[in-house]
Amino acid sequence: MYNGIGLETARGSGTNGYVQRNLSFIRRHKDNIDYKSEEELRKLDSQLVRGPNSEILDHERKRKVELKCMEMQELMEEQGLVVLVRGVNILMIKPIKHIPCLV
């Protein structure tokens, strides 16, 4: 027996106990089509259109700042200055000739 359908046991029934569903049964609930109103359709469309993710926009802004910092660092190194940076903080800017290990 499966979900209360079928025989408790196939013994003595002359069958193997396999239960098939009735494929000729017509279900009536498919005929009931629920049409949406114009307001519901507009509401569903507005839910599909979302704004940009604020975290992604914040990350893009940080990347632009980091790019500007790298360009500035390269420019200063071309001018003969050494820029020591930790993260976003500039620790020290000195001319190359004052640092003995880089000369």
Image: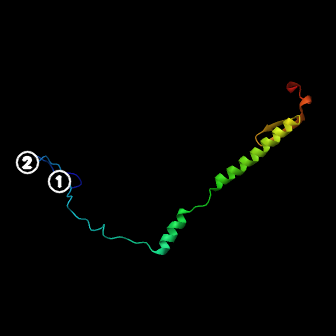
Element type at mark 2: loop
Q: Position of residue 8 (x, y in %)?
A: 16, 51
- Colour pattern: rainbow
Secondary structure under badge 1? loop
Query: What's the residue at 24%, 54% (across, down)?
Result: 3
Q: Residue at x 72, y 48 (%)?
A: 62
Q: Residue under circle 2?
A: 14
Res 73 quadrant in image: top right
Horizontal relation, residue 4 to residue 81: left or right = left
From what the image shows, is residue 39 above or below residue 9?
A: below
**Which three-letter amino acid code belongs to the residue tagged 1?**
Gly
Instruction: Write the residue at 89% across / 35% down.
Output: 94
Categorize mark 2 by other alpha carbons within 10 Å: few (<14), some (14-19), many (20+): few
Which mark, residue 6?
A: 1
* Dot 2 or dot 1, earlier in sequence: 1
Q: Marks 2/1: CA distance?
A: 14 Å
In the displayed structure, 80 sits above or below 56; it is above
Image position, residue 47 (x, y; %): 53, 64
Q: Amino acid at mark 2?
A: Gly
Q: Residue at x 23, y 65 (%)?
A: 26
